[in-house]
Structure formats: C-alpha cells, structure tokens
Image (spheres, rainbow, N blue to C red):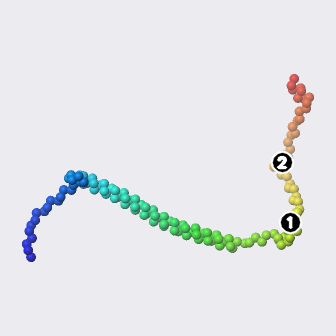
Amino acid sequence: MGKKKDKEPEEPEMPVDEDGNPIDDIAISKLEDTIVEEMVEELVTIVGLEVREKRRQEITGPYSAALLVNDCLRVGQWYAMARDEGSPDAGRPLHEAWTLEEEPTTGKPDAWARGAVPTKAKKKDTFAEVEHMKA
C-alpha cells in the first residue's frame, strides 16, 4: 500500500458562455432562477392537467353509470305500462263504429256569461236630433 500524495485542491473551472466569456456568480444565479421558474411553470401545468383529468374521470364514471341505470329503468317501466285496448267498439266494422253521438245539453249561464248582467241600452240618435246639433 502506497502512500497517497497530498494534492492541493484544484480550483474549479470558471464557467464560460457561448462566446467564451467568463460567467460570474450573479449571472449563474439568474440563469438558475430562470431555469427553475420555467421548470415550475411546466410542472404546474402538467400536474394541473393530470388533476383535472383524474377529477373528470372520477365524476363522469358514476354520472354515466347513473344515467345508464335510469335509462334502463325507464325502458323497463315502459314495458310494464298498461296497454290501451282502445274503444270497446273497435272490433266492429268502421261504418258501424263511427256513429253520431247525442248532442250535449247546453250549460246554465252564470254571472260571468255574456248577456247575464243587465246593461242600459244606448240611445240611438235619430236624423232629426243630428240635424238639430249641426245648427
């Protein structure tokens, strides 16, 4: 086992931009902040979309199932609905089944019927009275 040589720590290389200019700590900090902001915005967008999609699936599944069950029950109730057998005369030929019925009796007029409340008759103007008014 050999002895390890104590090496002096190397100074880290100074970062440079595309043009080869050295980048200071403030520029690096601003760059890191920009990158982190973009990452956070992207993550918030992606997570928001995932949460909305999951919530939509949680809501639409039971809602769709409830609609389907209700529709099936309504169709079942239609089949159980009583059938209208029609007129008792339906078995007879048409010329016998379609006959005139009795005429209904007239109803008794009440106080709201037309002509039920007595009114004063308007006086009709005669030709002589009209000629008299002109003069």
The residue beneath circle 2 is 114
The answer to whether any part of residue 113 appears in the image is yes
Q: Is residue 11 left or right of residue 83?
A: left
The crowding category of the residue bearing disc 1, from other C-alpha atoms within 10 Å (few below 14, some 14 to 19, many at least 20), is few
Which image quarter: residue 105?
bottom right
Q: How many marks?
A: 2
| Amino acid, disc 2 | Arg
Most foreground residue, 120 or 104: 104
Q: CA distance from mark 2 to mark 1?
A: 35 Å
Quarter occupied by the N terminus? bottom left
- Residue 85, image x, y percentages: 77, 71
| Amino acid, disc 1 | Trp
Most foreground residue, 88 or 38: 38
The residue beneath circle 1 is 98
Considering every residue shown, the one lying at the far bottom of the view is 1
Q: Is residue 59 left or right of residue 42?
A: right
- Residue 49, image x, y percentages: 43, 61
Q: Residue at x 31, y 57 (%)?
A: 36
Q: Residue at x 81, y 69 (%)?
A: 87
